[in-house]
Amino acid sequence: MKVRNITNDDMRRALMIVNKQYDNNVIWNRFESNGKGFRFTLKVKDSKKAGHRLSQSLTSKSNRTRMASACWHVHGDFFEALLSINEDAVIKTSGGITINKDGGNWQDRNIGSQFSPLYFSEACEC
């Protein structure tokens, strides 16, 4: 994801806010300054704790594998925290969604298939 019109301190404060909701389990997977803003991804320290994502594919026991990636709810809460800190922030997701003070957050989409749909909001245990 890319975000602009914010500072390094804004990003770190938003992460601290989110960690209060997710048992201090959320960390940066990627965090790079790119001149005009930042590129970042979020993950969890422990996939057995709050905020982890589940895989699209099923195991032989019809279970979904826990992933170290942060779930849809973590990302949405992070975006809300960032916008509450700095309403001029503009976030561009890898899915082409723009999130800013006027909206765009909490858009759900199918990450599964037509045969076996799975929405981002369902790919976790929140």
Image (tube, rainbow, N blue to C red):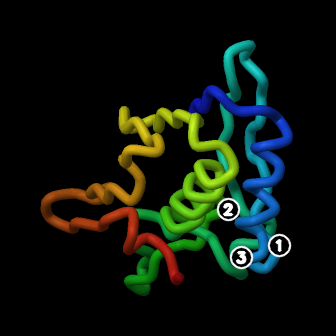
Label 1 with label 3: CB-CB less than 8 Å: yes
Q: For this rendering, which residue is in front, 3 or 115?
A: 3
Residue tagged by mark 3? 22
Q: Gap in Å between the C-alphas at discs 2 and 3?
A: 14 Å
Q: Amino acid at mark 2?
A: Ala
Q: For this rendering, which residue is in front, 95 or 101?
A: 101
Q: Amino acid at mark 1?
A: Asn
Which residue is at 40% across, 36% downward? 98
Q: Gap in Å between the C-alphas at discs 1 and 3?
A: 6 Å
Q: For this rendering, which residue is in front, 30 or 13?
A: 13
Which residue is at 64% across, 27% downward? 5
Q: Is residue 84 left or right of residue 93?
A: right
Instruction: Look at discs 2 and 3 and give the one toward the viewer.
Output: 3
- Residue 8's tag is none
Residue tagged by mark 2? 68
Quadrant housing the N terminus:
top right
